[in-house]
């Protein structure tokens, strides 16, 4: 059974990645924050008594479900209020910038030319744009496997699908990203 301290430390360790993953999915920072907070509350409320080693998988599954719930609510809301959308602000959502996730204080770019720094920034922005264009399941599998560094079994359990499906989604995501980046002249 996880202690309150262990649960708190676990939630601290996953909050930033969960937020970034949610922003990639919903493309709105405020909504992403709501999803992550809801997921954390559900984990603490319903599964806080579970052993600490079970929490990562449970949290990923809860986060996925909360994201799906958000999309369902948006679909209903958009259907109900589609006529009122003309009155909403055009600047309602802000763009998420992957470059903000880089740690500028690491000193890794000291001694680099301005051109190489700019090239790297543009490459990262292109990668971010292409990740956003992936189909939902491919993007989810790709982010869990390569961003969250989860193995195939953990990703399958979190997504509620087979390990073969995870491999297929990841393979297709990598192929699509590779093709899109090559078309832009980017070689990694």
Image (cartoon, rainbow, N blue to C red):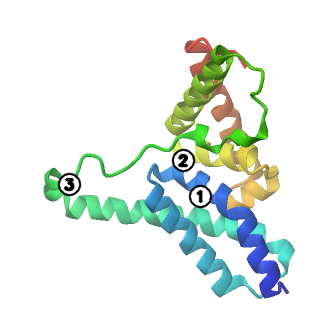
* Marks 2, 1: nearer the viewer: 1
Q: Please tell me whether residue 5 is drawn above or below residue 151 in the rendered image.
A: below
The alpha-carbon separation of the residues under discs 3 and 2 comes to: 23 Å
Question: Of the numbered discs in the image, which one, if any, rests on residue 129?
Answer: none
* Residue at figure coordinates x 70%, y 50% from the top left: 144
Q: Quadrant of the C terminus?
A: top right
Which residue has dot 1 on it? 19
How far apart marks 1 and 3 lie (CA) works out to 25 Å
- The numbered mark, 2 or 1, whose residue comes first in the sequence reads 1
State the quadrant of the N terminus: bottom right
Give the Cα separation between the discs numbered 2 and 1. Answer: 9 Å
Query: Residue at the location (60% across, 52% down)?
Result: 20
Residue 76 spot, x, y in % from top left: 30, 64
Per the image, label 1 sits on a secondary structure element best described as: helix
**Percent coordinates x, y for residue 123 in the rendering:** 61, 23
* Location of mark 3 (residue): 88
Q: Tell me if residue 153 comes above or below residue 60 in the rendering.
A: above
- The first of marks 1 and 3 along the sequence is 1
Q: Position of residue 161 (x, y in %)?
A: 68, 56
Q: Secondary structure at mark 3?
A: loop
Q: Residue at x 50, y 35 (%)?
A: 133
Q: Position of residue 183 (x, y in %)?
A: 56, 13
Report how many numbered discs are placed on residues in the image: 3
Q: In this picture, is 61 found above or below 41?
A: above
**Do labels 2 and 1 touch, CB within 8 Å?**
no
- The quarter holding residue 54 reads bottom right
Q: Provide the residue designation for mark 2.
A: 24
Is residue 40 visible in the rendered image? The answer is yes
Viewed as shown, does residue 86 lie left or right of 69?
A: left
Q: Viewer-nearest of labels 3 and 2?
A: 3
Q: Residue at x 62, y 29 (%)?
A: 124
């Amino acid at each position: 059974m996880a202690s309150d301290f262990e649960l708190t430390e676990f939630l601290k360790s996953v909050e930033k990645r969960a937020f970034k993953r949610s922003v990639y999915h919903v493309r709105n920072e405020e909504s992403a924050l709501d999803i992550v907070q809801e997921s954390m509350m559900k984990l603490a409320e319903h599964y806080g008594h579970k052993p600490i080693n079970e929490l990562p998988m449970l949290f990923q599954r809860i986060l996925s479900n909360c994201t799906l719930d958000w999309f369902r609510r948006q679909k209903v809301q958009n259907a109900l209020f589609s006529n009122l959308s003309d009155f909403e602000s055009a600047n309602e959502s802000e763009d998420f910038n992957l470059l903000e996730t880089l740690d500028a204080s690491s000193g890794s770019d000291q001694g680099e030319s301005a051109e190489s720094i700019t090239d790297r920034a543009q490459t990262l922005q292109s990668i971010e744009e292409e990740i956003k264009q992936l189909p939902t399941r491919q993007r989810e599998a790709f982010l869990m496997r390569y961003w969250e560094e989860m193995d195939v079994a953990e990703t399958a359990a979190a997504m509620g699908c087979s390990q073969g499906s995870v491999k297929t989604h990841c393979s297709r995501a990598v192929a699509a990203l590779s093709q899109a980046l090559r078309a832009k002249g980017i070689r990694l």
